[in-house]
Amino acid sequence: MPMKNHRRGYTLVELIVAVGLFALVMMLASGAYLMMIAINRQAQGLATGVDNIAFALETMTRTIRTGTHYSCNSGGDCTNGGTTFSVVNVNGTTMSYALSGGSITQNGSPLTDPSVIISSLTFYAFGTQTAPTDYQQARTIIIASGSIPTGHGKSVSFTIETGATMRGTDIRP
């Protein structure tokens, strides 16, 4: 009876095909992984920028809410919009807000991170008069526009609006 020669194992062609398929799958998976890392970095940069703007606006509105003696463009009300705003805080210190060098500043010190570019900052103030005929509660609207870099030369534009009303009353009977 003849003996059958049974060889077990893989041929060289089978090994080359298997290694090639494995390399192709790994290349596709690593490309997707690298893309996910890039998208995550963009999202983190955007979130950091948004947090920074929110901090600056919250700082301004908190001071405005608790402050007195509002002044827009150094002259009281500015119903058509102004570029600077000042208020006397609870400690009696005058706090001035403006746009300088692409950053929102408080008394000349930047409130926003240099990576966030603020292109426009407008204040609208109403009821800032302290005359006996003032029948309006002091309130302020702040509108800021700019862009937040997200990496690789790309950026996201934004426009944000917030308002603040004086907590104490300044209405004259």
Image (spheres, rainbow, N blue to C red):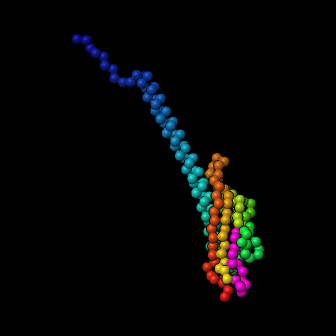
Q: Is residue 168 magenta?
A: no
Q: Quadrant of residue 119 in the image?
A: bottom right
In this rendering, would 60 be left or right of 84?
left
Q: Is residue 125 magenta?
A: yes
Q: Residue furthest left?
A: 1
Residue 113, visible in the rendered structure: no
Residue 163, visible in the rendered structure: yes
Q: Residue at x 66, y 70 (%)?
A: 141
Magenta segment, principal secondary structure? Answer: loop
Which stretch did the figure color magenta? 123-134
Q: Position of residue 37 (x, y in %)?
A: 55, 47
Q: Quadrant of residue 162 in the image?
A: bottom right
Q: Residue at x 50, y 37 (%)?
A: 28
Q: Nearer the viewer, residue 17 or 50?
A: 50
Count of all numbered marks drawn on residues in the image: 0
Q: Residue furthest right?
A: 74
